[in-house]
Image (cartoon, rainbow, N blue to C red):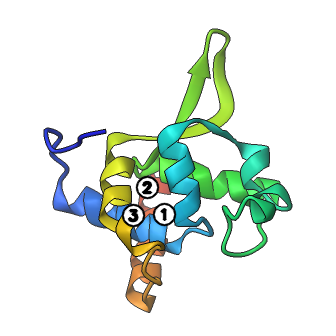
């Protein structure tokens, strides 16, 4: 998917990159999400560990919270079928942009302490308006 025509503000791109780097998910999951919708149960532990989608064991609730944060920052979207929202997720154009940036490296760069702090503060700031 080409994302060259879509402009993202530097702030939204930085926030999304930090969120992905700080998440418990692997590049393999983003590649899968680019090709098809992936259901929550396939992402959470133990299936997510077997599928190599996780960098550490993460339960169902925690995985869903992490995925929903990536939805909030614009990296993912919930998949919709004829009956409404499903439990599957897909990449957005912003997610594709981030994937293109790291696909050749084989993994995400490790988050710095600055990335972790920036991600934490972004979560607090966004949650104030919910």
State how far apart marks 3 and 1 are (Cα).
26 Å
- Determine whether, in the image, residue 36 is placed left or right of residue 56: left
Above/below status of 79 relative to 2: above
Check disc 2 and report its element: helix, strand or loop: helix
Residue 24: quarter of image: bottom right
Give residue 29's position: percent from left, percent from top.
Answer: 58, 56
**Residue bearing the label numbered 1:** 123
| Residue plotted at (33% across, 41% down) | 93
Q: Nearer the viewer, mark 3 or mark 2?
A: 3
Front-lying residue, 8 or 72: 8
Q: Find the distance from the CA under tag 3 to the CA under tag 2.
A: 28 Å
Q: Residue at x 50, y 52 (%)?
A: 31
Residue at image point 71% right, 57% down: 63
Q: Quick check: marks 1 and 2 in contact, CB under 8 Å?
A: yes
Q: Distance from label 1 to label 2 (Cα)?
A: 5 Å
The residue nearer to you, when weighing 69 against 100, is 100
Q: Position of residue 85 (x, y in %)?
A: 63, 24
Q: Are marks 3 and 1 in contact (CB under 8 Å)?
A: no
> Relative to residue 86, is residue 53 depicted above or below?
below
Q: Are marks 3 and 2 in contact (CB under 8 Å)?
A: no
Provide the residue designation for mark 2.
126
- Label 3: few (<14), some or many (≥20) within 10 Å? some
């Amino acid at each position: 998917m080409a994302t060259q025509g879509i402009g993202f503000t530097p702030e939204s791109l930085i926030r999304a990159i930090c969120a992905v780097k700080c998440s418990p998910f692997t590049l393999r999951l983003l590649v899968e999400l680019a090709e098809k919708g992936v259901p929550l149960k396939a992402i959470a532990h133990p299936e997510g560990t077997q599928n190599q989608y996780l960098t550490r064991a993460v339960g169902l609730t925690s995985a869903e919270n992490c995925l929903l944060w990536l939805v909030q920052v614009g990296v993912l979207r919930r998949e919709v079928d004829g009956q409404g929202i499903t439990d599957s997720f897909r990449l957005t154009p912003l997610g594709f942009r981030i994937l293109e940036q790291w696909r050749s490296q084989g993994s995400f760069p490790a988050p710095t302490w600055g990335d972790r702090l920036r991600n934490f503060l972004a979560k607090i700031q966004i949650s104030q308006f919910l």
